[in-house]
Amino acid sequence: MAEALAVAGVTPGARVLDACAGTGALGVAAGLAGAGRVTAVDRSRRAVCTAWLNARVRGLPVQARRGDFGDLVGRGRFDVVLANPPYVPAAGTSPKGRARAWDAGPRGRMVLDRLCAVLPLLLADKGMALVVHSTMCDEDVTLHQLRGAGLKASVVARRTVPFGPVLRSRVDWLVANGFIEEGQDSEELVVVRADAA
């Protein structure tokens, strides 16, 4: 994702939203690339504290806020929206604790679908969004939703990575529900770019 951001570029002084910020790594990357103001938002208190600390250590203008990216609709628009939302398919629909960072419902789209719906309301004119997720979540659905909302959308990066501990722990469930093949031990990640007119 950081590589895709470097390729896309950040206009000096850009207003950036790091949605589902986690550690704030994407907000930090945007700040280092010349963003004027970065807002990092996450539902987790620990994530917000970590994002704030990571930005402060580097002397970057990042405002870390606890909440949901949807709470920002109507409160200003952003030149760049970066998102690494939870996208791991999971049996339940109400993740708790640390699982909120990755579990995203039975299709892995619990957060992605909401994000796709509000992106047009968060992006400034000529704004750009970069969203990363697994192909298990069906990139065509993401592209269809974004295009249907009036954004130009395409996959700009792909990378195959080995399963981490979360996916390894639920391989049987993923196979049984048709997300992966028997014996599969890696997933393909995509970065989707969406541009406002």
Image: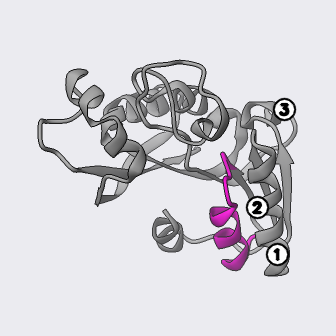
Give the residue drawn at x 68%, y 52%.
Answer: 21
Pick whichever of labels 1 and 2 is earlier in the sequence: 2
Secondary structure under badge 1?
A: loop
Question: Which residue has dot 3 on it?
Answer: 74
Q: Amino acid at mark 2?
A: Ala
Q: Position of residue 10 (x, y in %)?
A: 63, 70
Crowding at dot 1, Cα within 10 Å, few <14 / some 14-19 / many 20+, comes out as many
Q: Quadrant of residue 49?
A: bottom right
Secondary structure under badge 2?
A: helix
Q: Is residue 176 left or right of residue 105?
A: left
Pick whichever of labels 3 and 1 is earlier in the sequence: 1
User: Which of the pair 98/58 is nearer the observer?
Assistant: 98
Q: Relative to residue 165, is residue 27 depicted above or below? A: below
Pick whichever of labels 3 and 2 is earlier in the sequence: 2
Crowding at dot 3, Cα within 10 Å, few <14 / some 14-19 / many 20+, comes out as few
Residues tagged 1 and 2 counted as in contact (Cβ below 8 A): no
- Which residues, given as a range, are shown in magenta? 19-36
Q: Relative to residue 117, is residue 38 depicted above or below? A: below
Q: Amino acid at mark 1?
A: Leu
The reply to whether residue 20 is in sight is yes
Give the residue drawn at x 76%, y 61%.
Answer: 51
Question: Which residue has dot 2 on it?
Answer: 51
Q: How is the image coloured?
A: one colour
Q: Residue 60: which disc?
A: 1
User: Which of the pair 125/163 is nearer the observer?
Assistant: 163
